[in-house]
Image (tube, rainbow, N blue to C red):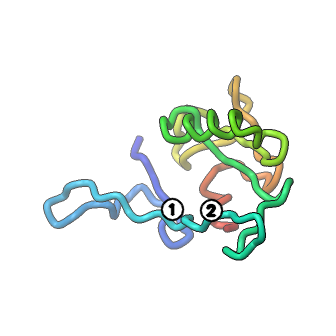
């Protein structure tokens, strides 16, 4: 199975993250806006306003979940965890042990959350 990605709102298994030599080049993230207490950044810190989506199969997401818990954000920021097995449509919210379905957008796949953003 080919690993897919979301490109311009469409799910594809064709990868564009390659340079002219065919080497992997990570695309820049689209979500780099800080959350501030006063909202000066355009994103105000507010309980219930934000939701964290992760896969425990990803080491970066796993670290994010640890920080989310250690900082006590689990009482103010919601959490959804996708199935660790990647399907043809990417990360899926399922009944796999340890998964937490998407209660905000009722998405079946994580890419659907990105489309809504």
Residue occupying image coordinates x 76% and y 56%: 50
The disc placed on residue 6 is: 1
The disc placed on residue 21 is: none
| Placement of the C terminus among the 4 image quadrants | bottom right
Task: Compute the Cα span from label 2 to label 1.
Answer: 8 Å
Q: Is residue 51 left or right of residue 55?
A: right
Q: Earlier in the sequence, mark 2 or mark 1?
A: 1
Observer-nearest of 62 and 66 = 66
Residue occupying image coordinates x 21% and y 64%: 19
In the picture of the structure, the residue carrying the numbered disc 2 is: 114
Q: Are marks 2 and 1 in contact (CB under 8 Å)?
A: yes
SS at mark 1?
strand
Q: Is residue 44 left or right of residue 62?
A: right
Observer-nearest of 4 and 116 = 116
Image quadrant assignment for residue 83:
top right
- In the picture as drawn, the residue positioned furthest to the top comes out as 97
- In the picture as drawn, the residue positioned furthest to the left comes out as 21
Residue 90 in picture, x, y percent from top left: 54, 47
Which marked residue is nearer to the observer: mark 2 or mark 1? Answer: 2
Q: Residues within 10 Å of mark 2 (few under 14, many from 20)?
A: few
Observer-nearest of 5 and 13 = 5
Observer-nearest of 46 and 58 = 46
Image quadrant assignment for residue 55:
top right
- In the picture as drawn, the residue positioned furthest to the front comes out as 38
Q: How many marks?
A: 2
Residue occupying image coordinates x 71% and y 76%: 40
């Amino acid at each position: 199975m080919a690993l897919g990605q979301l490109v311009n709102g469409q799910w594809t298994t064709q990868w564009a993250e390659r340079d002219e030599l065919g080497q992997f080049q990570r695309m820049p993230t689209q979500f780099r806006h800080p959350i501030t207490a006063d909202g000066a950044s355009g994103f105000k810190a507010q309980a219930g306003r934000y939701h964290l989506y992760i896969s425990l199969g990803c080491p970066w997401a796993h670290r994010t979940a640890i920080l989310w818990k250690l900082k006590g954000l689990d009482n103010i920021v919601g959490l959804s965890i996708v199935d660790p097995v990647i399907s043809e449509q990417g990360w899926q919210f399922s009944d796999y042990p340890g998964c937490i379905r998407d209660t905000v957008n009722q998405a079946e796949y994580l890419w659907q959350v990105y489309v809504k953003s």
